[in-house]
Image (cartoon, helix red, strand yellow):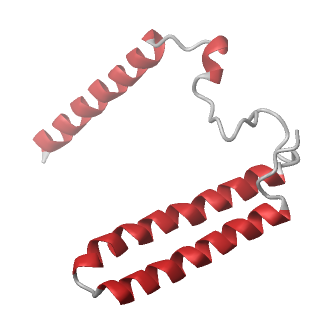
Amino acid sequence: MKILLTLSSIIFMITFFLMILASTISKKSFMDREKSSPFECGFDPKSTARLPFSLQFFLIGVIFLIFDVEIALLIPLILTMKLSNLLSYFLFTSFFLFILLAGLYHEWNQGALDWAI
């Protein structure tokens, strides 16, 4: 028991010494604080958190997610082409792409794709 306590205290002292040594040797300065700060969508993390957010940026993000899921659904559709007959595959693929193109047309018609600066 005495050996375990001695070894634990030695390990604790070595660890504490290495932590103190690393913090004194490291080159932290006031000028380097921007490097370690988070960067989120172009906002300055040191300013107020209640800044107006661009709705167009949000809509483009949502449209990207929708069409990203579209690609994830189209790849297995291409791989299952060998397993189904050509007519049912063509009808299902046409219906799926028609829904996606109708959604894209709706977004375009609503003005979500217009970047008025």
Viewer-side residue, 30 vs 88: 88
Residue at 76% in and 54% down:
113
Identified at 61% across, 57% down, the residue is 64
| Residue 51 located left or right of residue 46 | right
Nearer to the camera, 42 or 90: 90
Residue 30 appears at what percent x and percent y? 67, 14
Residue 77: x and y, percent? 36, 75
Question: Residue at image x 60%, y 78%?
Answer: 99
Which image quadrant for residue 84?
bottom left
Q: In this view, does 20 lie to the left or right of 58?
A: left
Identify the residue at the far front of this view. 87
Give the answer, above or below, for where 21 lies relative to 57: above
Compared with 21, 51 (above or below) is below
Pinpoint residue 42: horizontal percent, then vertical percent. 72, 35
Q: Which quadrant holds residue 45?
A: top right
Report the label total: 0
* Image vertical order of residue 113 relative to residue 30, above or below: below
Image position, residue 103 (x, y; %) = 68, 72
Q: Residue at x 36, y 67 (%)?
A: 75
Say whether residue 33 is left or right of residue 78: right
Q: In which quarter of the image is residue 109?
A: bottom right
* The one of 77 and 55 positioned closer to us in this rendering: 77
In this view of the protein, which residue sits in the foreground, 52 or 4? 52
1 to the left or right of 50: left
Task: Check the image and report above or below for 102 versus 2.
Answer: below
Q: In which quarter of the image is the C terminus?
A: top right
